[in-house]
Amino acid sequence: FKRYTPIATFISYFIWNISFGICFMLPGLRSSATKSVLASRAISSLPFGSKSNQYRIGTKLFAAHTISMVPGEFVSKTDGIIVTHPSYEVIKQDFVKEYGAKTVLYRHRQSGAEVLSVEADDDNKVFGITFRTPPEDSTGIAHILEHSVLCGSRKYPVKEPFVDLLKGSLQTFLNAFTYPDRTCYPVASQNIKDFYNLVNVYLDAVFFPRAVSDPMVFAQEGWHYEIEKPEDPLVYKGVVFNEMKGSYSSPDSLNSVISLNALFPSNAYSVSSGGDPRHIPNLTYEYFQNFHKKFYHPSNSRIYFYGDDSVEKRLELLDEYLKEFDYRDCNKDESMVKWQKKIDTPWKHSAYFATNEDGIGKHMVSVNWLLNDSPLSKKEKLALNILDDLLVGNSAAMLKKELTDSGFGSSVIGGGLSDELLQATFSIGLKGVSTENVEKVETLILDILDKCAKNGFEQSAIAASLNTIEFDLREFNTGSFPRGLSLMLGSVSNWIYDFDPTEEFHFESSLTEIKEDLKSGIPVFQNLLRKLIVENGHRVTVEMKPSLSYSKELDDQEKLTLEKAKSKMSPEKINNEIKQTQKLKELQAAEDSLEAKGSIPSLNLSDLERNIKKVPIDIYNWNDVKIVKHALPTSGIIYADIGFDFTSIPLSEYPLLGLFSKMILETGTNEMSQVELTRHISTQTGGIYCSNILGTKLGKDGNIPIEEEIIGYLFIRGKAVSDKSSEMMNIIKMIANDSKLDAQQRAIEILKESKARFESSIIGSGHSFAATRINSRYTLEAYLNEISGGVSSIQNINEFLKMAQDDWPFLHSRLQNIRKMLIKKENLIINLTGDLNVLKDAEKPIQEFIASFPVISDVSIQRALWKNEINLLPIENEGFAVQTQVNYVGKGGRLFMPGEIVPGSHQVVSRYLRNGYLWDNVRVMGGAYGGFCIFDPFNGMFSFVSYRDPNISKTISIYDKCADYLTSLNIPKEELELSIIGAVGDMDSPQSSDQKGFTSLKRHLIGMSDEDRQRIRNEILSTNTQDFLSFGNRLQEFNKHSRCAVIGSQNSLSEANQDIDDADLKFKINEI
């Protein structure tokens, strides 16, 4: 979630973000060996994001300084000895000193499978198996198979072992990815027993899936005709079918697919591996079966283990599966993507995307290059990453800045370098381009790049980008995303093409060579830019044209296709389709047998840690400013969070905080321009950015507060190596006090970018907008989230943009007043995370920073006034019409009232609903890509939401039946325990040290003590069947007053209104 997440629902939103399961990967996620470390960010279950600069970092080394961030000494359990096994031969051993990892590459003698075993001092163990799966067409075969193999297997004959694992595992990652040429199945867990349970289920799933013998799996996950009566029209249903309808409804996703396909006219990248909804129904079950037989063989696999577990155990477990296969000479002409030879002459390509009246005349234009048609060296790849940062790495990077400043479009698109496939690409452009500026965009991009190639880059820019990449590589901060998985994705991006899987992790030699070349005067980046881009004729300019009729044309085309299909069916064939529809629904509704359920390996309650994991915290005041410290291992880096209490500003100014926080970082200061400041940050620190904490103070004795007390801080967050902490604090002080808030043009650009981002997000992530909208009807905190990051914020952004263009002095004065009221000593709080010696070294810079603030006696706005200013949104059914082929259906309200205490056990029940009833009914039987619920135990709010859903009324009916389901449920003891285990796993999700420190601060601010956390954990561990009944009874009452918020098409919303008899309950439809 890019918008600020309410602190009180932090855990629920995190769970939400990982609970989709299986997903389709588009290129551009920067998961090559270098970029898996550079990005170090979680690949969410909806991985269609563009490059984020929120965590772009760097530290000064180009001149004389050297980064010193050494991983802790790792002593291998095998003590330098290569573990051997009679079933394997050793291909290569390697010690990656950069990350303290011992690696051995094995080949299984009988099956030919290659296995990379990585030993590391990390208890978050990772396993993954990857197959080369290049598609021949756009039917989505690889994607549908990815979904399907996780629907039962030989040893685990249940319908959804994937979901059973979600229910009762301590997994820290459980997913599957379909790339344009490969399919990955990774898992991770900190619990050794749980880890091997996950590995066993995944290995059996990929090699022996039920899907290849049961066509009903293919029908459910891929596509099928649905018809219940002879007179009914045929309709398409299928999880992947609807997922891709949602993906193709997003102009940004569509542009990415079309650009990739256009760049590679002669190989597998010319088609959509995720599947084009227009072509998915052409996929046959026979082809599906043969695809698995051809590609899902150990000889075509790459298998990966990482962590602190026994290498002997890894090899032995794996051999139990691999020994059932003999080596097969998998034809590389079929499994390997062929090199796309470069074309000398540039060309153009155009396509359409759906829009509304507001989008007419707003084109998308991108210029795309295929960079290489032979392998790049390790040094070239690293240099390309640095060049990419120079060009588009941040708002002040030369190409990105000039495109933004041109005014030709509303937002930069394309993402720059993508090198996770066989061949690297570079894409850049603009969205929101008027018709008369379409040709100008291409010309401008080519001119800028030509200028860079001729004139080169300023020394300060090179230093900043070089330092950015080096700090990234050395810090290797993956947050809550498993480090081992980041390494896996990087290794596979080379290994899958028969290149060395670990060579690129040795970045020291290439980095040194690049530095030495630069010192000797070699124009490294100019040469690379000229060779791979400027003088490269393999370039396609893609224009995406807006169309009011495109969405209707797709719908009409689909209906016509279905009508023709039915017209060719005999009565017997139609009756057979009716029977198949009924059979599939019966199978989907049927319970797995107790014997089948018992096959899924699981933990016991006795395997759980009974106590919470505590984070060290030291709180004290210095010169009237609260300082919070967390002594945690950070390898010599100081993480500083400088917060200002924004409840000191009037509520009317709160929606402007987003613009304000961007302005202070991206406009320069009285002494430095925007470019100079950005480069200074990159060369002196590990990155500086802004984020919010917004929450509600917990009630007395753990109850829901009767009177809401809002906690709100704007944080300027930075990180640096310890000896740069003083300079980092000086920069933060300069940003806070001296940033140029009078930069009108930059304000307009930021607002245009925000507008474009929100308009894109509501189509791709409508579920989050629906949930935010629902909650905003009940609580002050949620209302604040709505006006700053929900549907309402789109209107606010439009108003601010108009004001910036037509009445800038007024908007400027408001921004100045925000700074005057916000950046004051009495609003200040400081949060620090680092090693003990790092924290000690930071004391003087922090004290000097505090001392620089004068004591101001002005009386701040009182928090109580916010409550008086707010009129919560009316509780009613709302529909928001957008250009999409799918829906996002939300329904919610209060489950607990102010003054009540929410038992921790209800988190278990909510989780059980999400991974059971809702998964089965909304996703499996309803055809949506996701169906889940969100329960906030701190304010009593409960919401149902669906994702990429073909239905509205049917889904709401499913929500309404949850109460009856729970009150009549007789949950077996085994399932109850699994639900408890899963809930505990959610609580114990791994975090990096800086995340632990910031989360600990959040808890402190809202008044959550370790005792509160332990009480909740105890209540979760003590959950019983009565808690499910109690939850169901509350849902019965909840159904009477809860209301909906739905993001969908105008037609879908109008049809849903036809199903509602009560005029007061019909959707109030608004077009966005």
Image: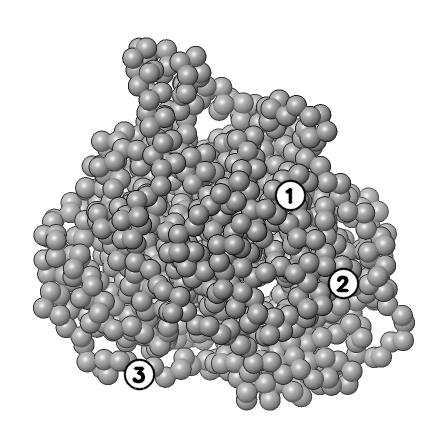
How is the rendered protein coloured? Answer: one colour
- Identify the residue at horizontal 49%, vertical 43% (top origin): 968
Q: Amino acid at mark 2?
A: Glu
Badge nearest the viewer, 1 or 2: 1
- Is residue 861 rendered to the left or right of residue 207? right
- Could you say whether the residue bearing mark 3 is in a helix, strand or loop? loop
Q: Earlier in the sequence, mark 3 or mark 1?
A: 3
Other residues around mark 3 within 10 Å, as few (<14) / some (14–19) / many (≥20)? some
- Is residue 981 rendered to the left or right of residue 580? right
Q: Is residue 14 in view from this perspective?
A: no
- Identify the residue at horizontal 56%, vertical 61% (top origin): 904
Image coords of residue 778 (percent x, y): 72, 49
Q: Amino acid at mark 1?
A: Glu
- Identify the residue at horizontal 41%, vertical 47% (top origin): 23
Q: Choose top left, top right, bottom left or bottom right for residue 974.
A: bottom left
- Could you say whether the residue bearing mark 2 is in a helix, strand or loop? loop
Numbered tag placed on residue 75 in the rendering:
3
Q: Amino acid at mark 3?
A: Val
- Is residue 1004 rendered to the left or right of residue 588? right
Taking depth in this image into account, of 1056 and 26 the one nearest to the observer is 1056
Residue behind mark 2: 709
Per the model, the C-alpha gap separating discs 1 and 2 is 27 Å
Numbered tag placed on residue 1037 in the rendering:
1
Q: Choose top left, top right, bottom left or bottom right for residue 572.
A: top left
Q: Is residue 19 in view from this perspective?
A: yes
Numbered tag placed on residue 599 in the rendering:
none
